Structures are given as C-alpha cells and as structure tokens.
Image: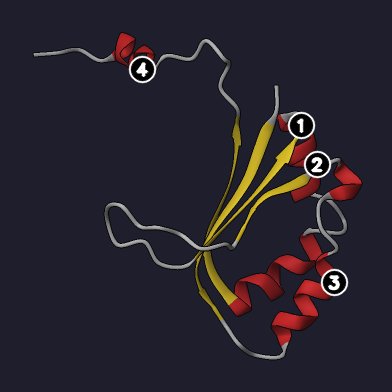
C-alpha cells in the first residue's frame, strides 16, 4: 500500500544555503517517489495555518523509509534543519474501505 512523506515547513530561511539544499536534494525519484503537493497556495479554512506543505508519495512504506534514511537524504538533514523549521513524517495510506469511525473501536465512552 502506498505511503507518504510529508513536511510542514513553518519557517524557511532566505539564506544562500536554501539554493544549495535544493540543488543537492535531488528529489525522491531514485526511491520511486513522486511529489504530490509542493508548496502551492493554501486556502486556510480553519486554524492558523502558516508555512508550506510538501507531500511525496511512494509505492509502499518501506520505500518511503528507505528514501528518508538513504545516503542521499541523511547527509542533507543538518542543512535542512539549519535553514528551516518543520514537522516531517511518514504515513501509510489507508485502504479504500477505511471508515473514520473505525478508530472508535478502542475508545471507551463514559
């Protein structure tokens, strides 16, 4: 089942290191990843959304993990954390039969 790597970048520096990072990043293609959301306009409906959202899709969770932990990605981590503030995550896609109320099976109502 496909999986996603996501990053919510709340602060991104305008220092020259940003261009260096982007040129060295190279993207997720070697691990069969594809950008699905890439910092486009956001229409905020609720809350205090700030920043940029990046979403990359992979064919499965293992490929997403391999990409994040790769020898191409990990050396760039200190540079990315120097030039930005972000929450970064990997998450597996839910099945087509997913039901939002399914999370309630382990919730005890008082």
* Residue 55 appears left or right of 42: right
In the image, residue 13 lies at what x, y percent? 57, 83
Q: Residue at position x 40%, y 58% from top? A: 43
Q: Residues within 10 Å of mark 1 (few under 14, many from 20)?
A: some
Q: Quadrant of residue 39?
A: bottom right
Judging by the rendered image, the residue that carries numbered circle 3 is 24
Numbered circle sitting on residue 73:
none
User: Which quadrant of the figure has residue 65?
Assistant: top right
Location of the C terminus (image quadrant)? top left
Q: Quadrant of the N terminus?
A: top right
Point 60% across, 27% down: residue: 93
Kindly state the secondary structure of the residue where label 1 is placed: helix
Place of residue 54 in the rendered image (x, y in percent of width and height, measured from the top left): 61, 56
Q: Residues within 10 Å of mark 2 (few under 14, many from 20)?
A: few
Q: Which residue is mark 1?
A: 62
**Whether residue 97 is situated above or below residue 67 in the rendered picture:** above
Instruction: Please give the name of the residue rendered at 77% of the width and 73% of the height, measured from the top-left corner.
Output: 22
Q: Are marks 1 and 2 in contact (CB under 8 Å)?
A: yes
Nearer-the-camera pick, 49 or 6: 49
On the image, the x and y values in percent for residue 78 come to: 69, 71
The alpha-carbon separation of the residues under discs 1 and 3 comes to 23 Å
Q: Earlier in the sequence, mark 4 or mark 3?
A: 3
Query: By what rule are the colours in the image chosen?
Result: secondary structure
In the rendered view, would you say 99 is above or below 23? above
- The residue indicated by pointer 4 is 103
Which badge, 2 or 4, is on the more N-terminal residue?
2
Q: Which residue is mark 2?
A: 66
Q: Kindly report which numbered mark, 2 or 4, lies closer to the viewer in this rendering.
A: 4
Q: Position of residue 32 (x, y in %)?
A: 86, 40
Neighbourhood count class around disc 3 (C-alpha, 10 Å): few under 14, some 14–19, many 20 upward: few
């Amino acid at each position: 089942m496909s999986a996603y790597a996501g990053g919510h970048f709340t602060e991104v520096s305008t220092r020259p290191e940003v261009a260096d990072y982007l040129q060295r990043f190279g993207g997720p293609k070697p691990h069969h990843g594809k950008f699905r959301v890439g910092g486009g306009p956001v229409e905020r409906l609720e809350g205090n959304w700030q920043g940029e959202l990046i979403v990359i899709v992979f064919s499965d969770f293992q490929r997403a993990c391999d990409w994040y932990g790769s020898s191409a990605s990990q050396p760039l981590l200190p540079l990315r954390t120097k030039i930005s503030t972000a929450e970064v995550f990997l998450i597996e896609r839910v099945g087509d039969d997913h039901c939002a109320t399914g999370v309630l099976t382990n919730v005890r109502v008082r």
